[in-house]
Image: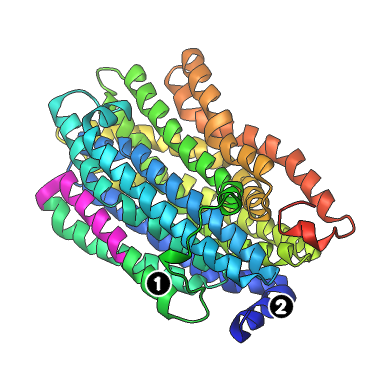
Amino acid sequence: MDRKQNEKYIRMTTAPVKGLIVRLAIPTMISMLVTTLYNLVDTYFVGQLADTRATAAVTVSYALMNIIQAVGFFFGQGSGNYISRALGNKEAEKCRKMAATGFLGALLSGTLILVFGMIFAEPLALLCGSEKDAQSLGYATDYMRVILIGAPAMCSSLVLNNQLRFQGNATFAMVGLSSGAVINVLLDALLVPRYKVFGAAIATVACQYVSFFVLLFCTKFLSDNLKFSIKDASFRPFYLKEIFRGGFPSLCRQGIASVMNVSLMHCCAIAATAQQTTSVLQAAFGIVSKLTMFISSMMIGFGQGFQPVCGFNYGAGRYDRVREGFRFCVAITAIFLTLMSVAFFTFSSPVLSFMQRSSEDGAGREAVNIAVKILRRQLISLPLMSFVVMSNMMLQTMGKVVPASLLAASRQGMCFLPAILLLPPLFGMTGVEIAQSVADVLSFALAIPITINVLKELSRPESDPDTVLSGKS
């Protein structure tokens, strides 16, 4: 371990925990805020087309985006989690091999998604919930085909971003994401009015490639980042196992999010009426999804500032600092989510009206009316996610794959899927609207005993240092 990395080790394991988390969280919060803001801008420009079918097409494409992100987060979180613990254990050579393995794995996987996605683009759009009429299917297929071109860059960018964060270099990750986001907003304004959904997809892909090259430059040439080359990659069982242990919870979370989105889009088709058409319902859920993600982004960014602190100190055996950081993050994010939920509950109607322009047939206005009810119901339970998300981040960073995967799969999988299947037959459209809130409450109830048990383990006398890096306690 060189001098700069040794100085970082000392800082990460001895500096006051709260101040350290805040310093690391500021750039990650900015990154998340900028990323979700450009997603909102993307939805805004599509919404100004006054065609709910266009908004619905972007919404059904979320499932494809989630699949691509699932692969990127699998390799990024898997390699990044190990890197932070290994740096805490002063094993720099293994870190370089892990960084290269995660990057190459994501690049190859993204390329495979691109190839197979192009071949099956139209069936994929139908599977994701697109309506079968020519206009809706055309919008969805056009959007997906362009998005697929960005799959290799998107997967690889997520790996570089996560590896930089877990090394404690979140500022460089912020620069990479923010630069691409600025390009996306500018291209949206330029291309969407002329090329509609196709233009929005081009803007998104351009953003991904800009972010990729900026992150690659930061990794290769700046500061005390781990320097690696493709030849350092090693697909030995040890590295694959560690990527799986650290990345599987993210793969569950993002993969199940894709399944959730598909299920929700098909439920919209079942619940549709003459006035509340499938595209109207899908558009309503789409703008609500983007807005709740915008609200949650600051919480997620704050938690990402905790992850490298958690990884370094867990690897170094400083469990007291892990517990302190977890409690601090839960308290801060719970307060923040409560305040944001109250504000957006109060002003939900004007905010959502701004996102979706009314059309001559009244579909846009109907989509906004439905979205207001959905948003308000989801905001009631949203503050509970502070505990669930922080628990999941802590467990995943510690390498506790089973409990982390359970929590990752709970909100949008184990709890949401039964809710979306059982509630609509009982309560009609209201059942569709409250499914996410019910899932939030159930996932919170699941997180409590799992997290308390782990915190008790961290309160016991420190275990053998040789077991720490493997995630055992």
Region rendered in magenta: 194-210
Mark 1 residue element: helix
Q: Is residue 197 magenta?
A: yes
Asked whether residue 407 appears in the rendered view, the answer is: yes
Residue furthest out toward the bottom: 3
Total marks placed: 2
Q: Amino acid at mark 2?
A: Ala
Magenta stretch: dominant SS?
helix
Mark 2 residue element: loop
- Position in image of residue 253 (x %, y %): 52, 41
Relative to 322, residue 411 above or below = above
Which residue, given by chain and number where applicable, does mark 1 sit on?
Answer: 175
Residue furthest out toward the left: 194
Which residue is painted at 43% across and 52% down in the image? 105
The quarter of the picture where the N terminus appears is: bottom right
Q: Is residue 307 magenta?
A: no
- Position in image of residue 104 (x %, y %): 42, 57
Relative to 183, residue 267 above or below = above
Q: Amino acid at mark 1?
A: Val
Residue 132 quadrant: top left
Q: Is residue 114 left or right of residue 51?
A: right
Q: Is residue 101 left or right of residue 460?
A: left
Asked whether residue 347 appears in the rendered view, the answer is: no
Residue 281 quadrant: top left
Circle nearer the N terminus (2, 1): 2
Closer-to-camera residue (259/442): 259
Res. 12 mark: none
Distance from disc 2 to disc 1, alpha carbons, whole Å, reads 25 Å
Which residue, given by chain and number where applicable, does mark 2 sit on?
Answer: 15
- Position in image of residue 291 (x %, y %): 41, 48
